[in-house]
Image (cartoon, rainbow, N blue to C red):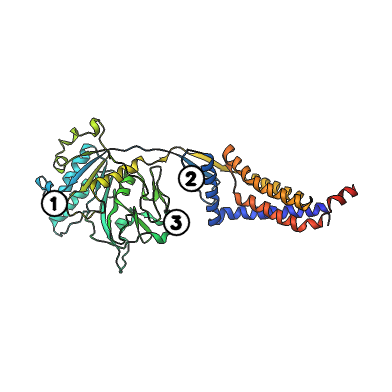
Amino acid sequence: MTPWLVRIILAVLALEAGVCVAFLADDWDPLRKKEEIFFETVLSKTRSGQDFVLDKSQPISRVHLVRPLKEGAVQPYFHIPVDEKSTEVLESYPPSPTDWHALLKHMHEVGCKIAAIEQPMSWEGDDLYHWGRLASLDRSLALYETAVLTVDLQRLPKHEAIPEYLRRTAIPLSNVNGELGSLVRVNRVLHAPSATAAQNIRFSFRVQESAEGVAPQFVRWDDYLIPSFPLAVAMAHYKIPPDRVKIELGRHIRLGDGPIIPIDEIGQLQMKLVERPQRAEISAEIAVLKSEIPQTRISGGSTIPRCALFTNAGADNPSPWDSHNHLQKIISSFDVLPRPDGTELHHRLTIAGEIALLGLIAITAAFLASIPKLLRNFSFLILTLLLPALLVALFVGSHKWTPFAPVLATILVGWILATRMARHLPSPKVARTEC
């Protein structure tokens, strides 16, 4: 076997190994995730002090979307606590459908676009008067861009299918990355809501009785996630539909182009809360009288807040939040979190470019097979160490990238084959004698 034929065989075999691994880097999920981690690590190490997030690309995509982050700012909102004292102007406590119709209608006329109501809306009745009041409530809820309502959830031995009104506003489980077995599960609504007809309603949970001592921002029901009340308010405020919420357990919740919320493995918040939410306090007595509300502004400004937050301030409120101020801190804390600002496109090398790179590595490995063993192994070691630096320079200098595993596979296969097939090549001394 001639030396040139041996070298050609070495180069072809090493190139084939690299090409096969390149296909795996596209189609094999575990390897693709490792490549994404490598890419993200390189960017993190080369961008000191610059925060960014990487949009996960599809297997067939040859573009990585890198999103630089900017800090957010606290957004103002109206806060309307509803308690026993509200019966001076309302029919009852808890408020009746007629009471909520008046409150919601007046706050919309003021200029609010989002209504967030902490107390579940559930009433009993089957006469025409009851249905008429619910119809009025549905009309007032429909005035808003988004209305966020709550339900209380629990987990019982007897499983129930997720109701349609919860399913259509829930986050798909397919949007979650991580160990799904750690998620808190629910399978029943404590009291079915009476208001479900308006298409702009989004449901969230106030209480979940399925796990003690935990406060996740979402719970699992079948193949859907029900968001917590604060999370649903943030989704409404930033106009993020459920299918644009991406969750990485142990890392963060991404609300589309909105805030990136840090969480642990089961969805509990991992962040420091702001101390002073920016809100305008309005009593239910004033809120029901629309003529009084326009005089209320945030810090003397002229902007009407988009969101009207109605909280249950009654003594018997089973809310998991320690106080209403704590709930408001969570909602305002989401505002100050970083969010994507702009897009950087990092294109993958063309197929021809990747084959050329792998081919160059394979040919280099084949030629190194003819040098003395000690020097050959040292040269392969140096080449293996230099390849990551080459890829880093490619990533940083040109916004181009290529998978790391095929490059590593090519050089390692070339190294192994060179070690095994070097005996088929003439030694350097013999080659010089023949010359």
Provide the secondary structure element on which disc 3 rests: loop
Q: What residue type is labelled 1?
A: Tyr
The image's mark for residue 93 is 1
Per the image, the residue denoted by label 3 is 178
Provide the secondary structure element on which disc 1 rests: loop
- Give the residue at the far right of this rendering: 434
Q: What residue type is labelled 3?
A: Gly
Report the side of 323 relative to 13 (left or right).
left
Counting from the top left corner in percent of width and height, residue 247 is at 41, 51
Label located before the other in sequence (1 or 2): 2
Label located before the other in sequence (2 or 3): 2
- Look at 72% across and 52% down and name the residue there: 377
Counting from the top left corner in percent of width and height, residue 241 is at 36, 48
Q: What residue type is labelled 2?
A: Leu
Mark yes or no: residue 108 visible.
yes
| Crowdedness near tag 3: few (<14), some (14–19) or many (≥20) residues, C-alpha within 10 Å | some
